[in-house]
Amino acid sequence: MAHWFYKIQLEEKLELISSEIESQKSSLIWHENIESGQHYAGLMDGRHHNGQHGTQWCELQLSEDSVSILEKKVGHPIFKSLFYLWNYGSVKELPIHIDRPEINYGNAISGILPLEGTFDLKVYENIDDKKPVDSCIYGPGDIVLLNNLDYYHKGEVLSGQKVGLHFFLDLKIFDSPTIEDILKT
Ligand SMILES: [Fe+2]
């Protein structure tokens, strides 16, 4: 097991969660990611970056049933105060960056549940490294838990339009073990 990410199969349970999200689509309020992108790009030589201009995000609610499905699959309580959708639209690249604790609401591990599109994720220990420490391709039917505060990451949309549900494990940074420690509990 790795420190940087862990990929889990959600499989047939995806249908339950994606239909619940679909039912909310008409009431979702989408925001352009332009402002936060510009803000974070100005920090630390652009190394902290919340996505790329041109993407959109919105907050949404998840039922207790869906949260319970996610928690059973990841084997750890989920931070229930924030779930959001992130839609890349026509954007195909996520530039290399590391996220800051505020982005994660103080939680150590972010989770991604892809709804559309396949994505090639690469993880680096240092921003200047030529070779990633690891990589994975994920898409609908997967969940990826990512240590996005300790590891630089970037990615490329391989097919389709990337739309994903984003969440966090309910695990604060100060009591953060590694991903393998979390999954042992
Ligand atoms: Fe990130």
Image (cartoon, rainbow, N blue to C red):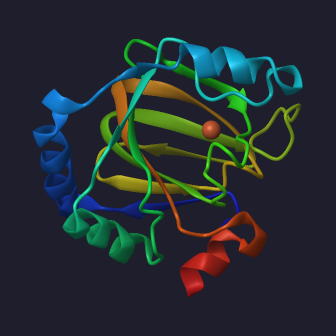
Ligand 1, what quadrant? top right
Find residue 147 and report its horizontal and vertical position in percent. Answer: 66, 55
Regarding residue 35, the answer to whether it shows in the image is yes
Q: Quadrant of the N terminus?
A: bottom right
- Residue at 60% x, 77% y: name it: 182
Find residue 14 and report its horizontal and vertical position in percent. Answer: 22, 55
Q: Nearer the viewer, residue 181 or 38?
A: 38
Find residue 39 and report its horizontal and vertical position in percent. Answer: 71, 19
Q: Is residue 95 left or right of residue 17?
A: right
- Residue at 14% x, 57% y: name it: 16
Q: Is residue 148 left or right of residue 137?
A: right
Find residue 173 and report its horizontal and vertical position in percent. Answer: 73, 64
Q: Nearer the viewer, residue 155 or 56?
A: 56
- Residue at 66% x, 61% y: name it: 108
Q: Quadrant of the C terminus?
A: bottom right
Q: Is residue 15 above or below residue 78?
A: above
Q: Is residue 72 above or below residue 31?
A: below
